[in-house]
């Protein structure tokens, strides 16, 4: 099979995936084994994803491994090679039967479809400098800034979080600003 790993992201980006076992080991594509993560091994963990035309839909091949449920993360490569600081664009699980995706087996391809927070009813998990999402989202950000609007739940570890309208926000950082029917829990320097 091919194209089992799927991610939606901004068109024209370099996107890759990393596969983890149920015990947290990472798949080494060079040696075809699961191993304990090392930063120096990162280039060996990368599974390149290819964009279909200019659709922003990226796919890649899942490795041939034993059956099981595997965690997959998709990242946008920022520099010339993969780095720990690359931006997380999605994550999910794939239930693998040893030769393909096990549909209905406790995890399916549909469970790995990734929405990055640019439309309504998304789940957005971002690690990076900034994350902005709109309308009925769950936004979890580890980074410097998070801005969300309308019917959101935001959990931020970083320096600044701003939300508007019907939000629940939990912030560990320096600044938290909310408006209109919000619940705010803040650990940090300033609450406004």
Image (cartoon, helix red, strand yellow):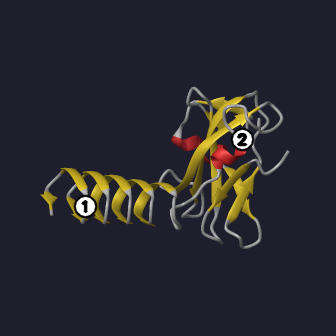
Regarding residue 72, the answer to whether it shows in the image is no
Residue drawn at the location 72% of the way across and 73% of the way down: 54
Q: In the rendered view, would you say 80 is above or below 138?
A: below
Residue drawn at the location 29% of the way across and 61% of the way down: 161
Q: Nearer the viewer, mark 2 or mark 1?
A: 1
Viewport quadrant of the N terminus: top right
Q: Nearer the viewer, residue 41 or 172?
A: 172
The percent coordinates of residue 135 (x first, y second) are 44, 65
The percent coordinates of residue 13 (x first, y second) are 63, 68
Marked residue nearer the N-terminal end (2 or 1): 2
Regarding residue 105, the answer to whether it shows in the image is yes
Circle 2/circle 1 CB separation < 8 Å? no
Give the labeled residue for mark 2.
29
The percent coordinates of residue 186 (x first, y second) are 20, 51
Name the disc covering residue 37, or none. none
Q: Quadrant of residue 95?
A: top right
Within 10 Å of disc 2 (Cα), the crowding (few <14, some 14-19, many 20+) is some
In this rendering, position of residue 120 left or right of residue 168: right
Viewport quadrant of the C terminus: bottom left
The percent coordinates of residue 136 (x first, y second) are 45, 60
Give the labeled residue for mark 1.
181
Q: Nearer the viewer, residue 30 or 55?
A: 55
CA–CA distance in space, label 2 to label 1: 49 Å
Residue drawn at the location 74% of the way across and 61% of the way down: 50
Judging from the image, what secondary structure is the residue with disc 2 in?
loop
Judging from the image, what secondary structure is the residue with disc 1 in?
loop
Within 10 Å of disc 1 (Cα), the crowding (few <14, some 14-19, many 20+) is few
Residue drawn at the location 59% of the way across and 44% of the way down: 92
Total labels drawn: 2
In this rendering, position of residue 60 left or right of residue 39: right
């Amino acid at each position: 099979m091919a194209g089992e790993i799927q991610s939606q992201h901004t068109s024209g980006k370099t996107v890759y995936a990393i596969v983890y076992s149920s015990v947290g080991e990472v798949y080494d594509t060079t040696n075809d084994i699961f191993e304990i993560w090392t930063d120096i091994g990162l280039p060996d963990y990368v599974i390149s994803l290819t964009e279909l035309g200019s659709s922003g839909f990226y796919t890649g091949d899942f490795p041939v491994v034993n059956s099981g449920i595997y965690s997959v993360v998709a990242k946008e490569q920022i520099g010339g090679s993969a780095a720990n600081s690359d931006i997380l664009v999605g994550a999910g699980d794939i239930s693998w039967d040893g030769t393909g995706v096990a549909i209905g087996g406790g995890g399916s391809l549909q469970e790995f479809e990734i929405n990055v927070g640019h439309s309504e009813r998304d789940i957005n998990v971002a690690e990076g400098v900034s994350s902005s999402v709109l309308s009925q989202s769950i936004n979890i950000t580890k980074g410097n800034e998070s801005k969300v609007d309308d019917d959101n739940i935001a959990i931020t570890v970083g320096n600044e979080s701003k939300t508007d309208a019907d939000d629940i926000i939990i912030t560990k950082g320096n600044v938290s600003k909310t408006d209109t029917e919000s619940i705010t829990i803040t650990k940090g320097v300033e609450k406004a």
